[in-house]
Amino acid sequence: YPEILSYRYLLSRKTIDITWGSHFPERQRVDTNALNTEPYDDHHLVQAARNGR
């Protein structure tokens, strides 16, 4: 799966902003409702991003 450079968890909006590698310059916002597991590691973030925001 693509490499994740960084991400930040926005507690107020319950979303995660993912910054992908050079192939994906734009940030992607993922709703944490799409995530069933914690902690939010790279693999789960990628799965959530694939499932939609």
Image (spheres, rainbow, N blue to C red):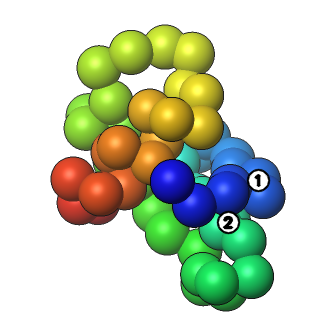
Please say if the residues under marks 1 and 2 sit with CB atoms less than 8 Å apart. yes
- Label 2 neighbourhood size at 10 Å, few (<14), some (14-19), many (20+)? some
Residue 47 x/y as whole percent: 35, 43
Height in image: 18 above or below 23?
Answer: above
Where is residue 31 drawn, in percent x and y? 34, 47
- Write down the quadrant of residue 3 in the picture: bottom right
Q: Nearer the viewer, residue 41 or 30?
A: 41
- 22 left or right, relative to 9: right
Q: CA distance from mark 1 to mark 2?
A: 5 Å
Identified by mark 2, the residue type is: Thr
Q: Residue at x 23, y 60 (%)?
A: 52
Residue shown at the point (39%, 15%) measured from the top left: 37
In this rendering, is residue 50 above or below 10? below
Q: Which residue is mark 1?
A: 6
Secondary element at image label 2: strand
Q: Nearer the viewer, residue 12 or 38?
A: 38
In the depicted structure, whether residue 50 falls above or below residue 31: below
Q: Name the residue tied to disc 2.
A: 19
Q: Is residue 13 visible?
A: no
First of labels 1, 2 by sequence position: 1
In the rendered image, residue 39, in percent from the top left (x then y), is placed at 57, 16
- The kind of residue tagged 1 is Ser
